[in-house]
Image (cartoon, grey):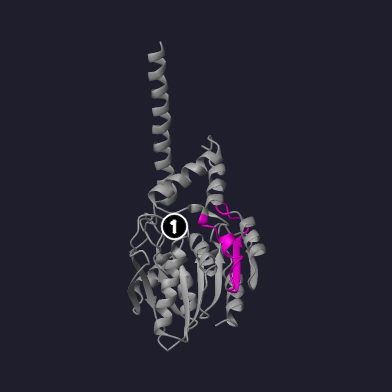
Amino acid sequence: MAKKNHFLFLGFVSAIVGGGAVLGNYLYNLSSNPKTRFSEEGSNKEDEIMQGRLWIRDHERRQDLYIDSLDKLRLHASYISTEKESHKYAILIHGIHDNNEEMGVYAKHYYDQGINILTPDLRGHGQSEGTYAGYGYYDRMDIMEWIYWIIKRDANAKIFLHGVSMGAATTLMTTGEHLPANVVAAISDSSFTAALEEFVYVYKKGKKAILPSGFMTWLLWLEIRVRAGYDIKLASPIKAVVKSKTPTLFIHGDEDGFIPPNMCARLFEAAQCEKEYCIILGADHIKGVIVDPSNYWKKIDNFIKSKI
């Protein structure tokens, strides 16, 4: 009987371990696999976002740039310089599961104002090397490398960052670092406060949220720690903004169903830099530029006008 109980116990433990491994793999792929989900199939070619993608892709002045990250990944960005010499630069940072072309609608607006455009592919996305989404943790250092790429070529550069979703989180985490004076402003559109907090929020909204969120968070943390090699607890924009000295505009849609608007409010309250706050009424996740472009761009243009 004791031997039978022993085998039953081992079977139970094996089932738990095996089930945890399967669940952990599922969570990792869902959250951290950077494979681009955007597909042009069935896309409306007249859609403003789609037009922006095509604007970057087909622009006659677009150049493909490549640099190496600090951990030796080959990183890609598209660069579109103005026809007349300009010392103004916008680094535009896309969200998860996409690529630099997502920022086309923003790039065109800035380019029309005589601003040079740099749109990086975050590591693991687009043409950049990497196997996981970093939620801004490693990405902040990659963005700094792009900043220095600009400054090496233009010592008089005035640079601002504009990111959406995970790109907004990356923007804020970058401003938490010691940046050169050439970086004069940042725009955060729909950032989360912390990656794990965002995971819990999305998990609890799901219909299959049966297991405790604390256990699921721990399992995701463990998977990322083992497989990606970093601590996702450190992907925390709300800790970064406390250290930031970069003037920052925080933007969010009041109907955002993916990243709750109260996260933007908390980021704004925590920030110790010069700051402004803008809620776009009626806008879901990163849809402010589409729902109310007049108000969206008026707020941004007024914010950066005195900075660049």
Q: Is residue 47 visible?
A: no
Furthest toward the bottom, the residue is 84
- Looking at the image, which residue is at 61% across and 57% down? 263
Q: Is residue 219 magenta?
A: no
Where residue 145 appears, as percent x and y from the top left, is 41, 72
In the image, 31 versus 69, the foreground residue is: 69
Please determine whether, in this image, residue 232 is positioned above or below residue 100: above
Q: Which residue is mark 1?
A: 134
Q: Name the amino acid type tagged 1.
A: Gly
Horizontal relation, residue 230 to residue 303: left or right: left
- Quadrant of residue 147 within the rendered picture: bottom left
Q: Secondary structure at mark 1?
A: loop
Residue 111 seen from this side: yes
In the displayed structure image, the side of residue 308 where residue 13 appears, left or right: left
Q: Magenta segment, which residues?
A: 234-259
**Magenta segment includes 256:** yes
Q: Position of residue 25 (x, y in %)?
A: 39, 42
